[in-house]
């Protein structure tokens, strides 16, 4: 008997992040890269400080301590500047900007 399994997504990889002692990591979970998770972590302890998650439609956010997830926006495209398009080339910059704002940083 033949068996077939399908899985979406990619492994985790780093995105540019300006804060020493922290890393920003990203992974796709499917939907043609419309499902994704991005986390800011302590570089040494690997503990999560903030997370943004797109479920292919809505954007969810959580911040330490507690990391209780809440609906951040009705559409994941909310990470892009007003009037900007969801060009994949801008996605890492848009994610980093959204996480800085979530953490109360500029």
Image (tube, grey):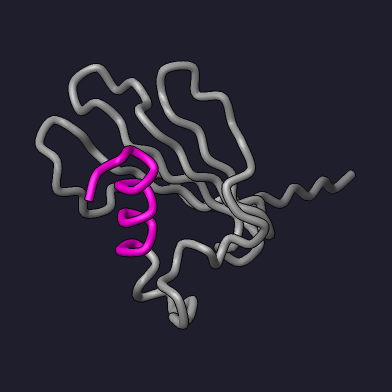
* Foreground pick, 89 / 12: 89
Q: Position of residue 75 (x, y in %)?
A: 64, 62
Q: Is residue 22 left or right of residue 40?
A: left
Span shown in magenta: 92-106
Q: Residue at x 42, y 17 (%)?
A: 65
Q: Quadrant of residue 91?
A: bottom left
Q: Is residue 61 left or right of residue 65?
A: right
Q: Does residue 80 belong to the magenta stretch?
A: no
Report the predominant secondary structure element of the magenta stretch: helix
Q: Is residue 43 left or right of residue 46?
A: left
For the N terminus, the quadrant is top right
Q: Residue at x 20, y 34 (%)?
A: 22
Return the residue found at the far right.
1
* Foreground pick, 27 / 54: 54
Q: Does residue 97 belong to the magenta stretch?
A: yes
Q: Residue at x 30, y 64 (%)?
A: 93
């Amino acid at each position: 008997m033949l068996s077939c399994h399908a899985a979406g997504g990619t492994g985790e990889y780093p995105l540019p992040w300006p804060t020493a002692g922290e890393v920003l990591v990203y992974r796709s979970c499917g939907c043609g890269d419309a499902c994704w998770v991005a986390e800011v972590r302590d570089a040494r302890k690997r503990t999560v400080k903030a997370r943004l998650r797109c479920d292919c439609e809505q954007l969810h956010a959580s911040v330490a301590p507690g990391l209780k997830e809440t609906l951040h926006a009705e559409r994941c495209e909310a990470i892009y500047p007003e009037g900007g398009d969801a060009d994949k080339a801008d996605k890492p910059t848009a994610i980093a900007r959204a996480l800085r704002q979530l953490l109360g940083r500029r």
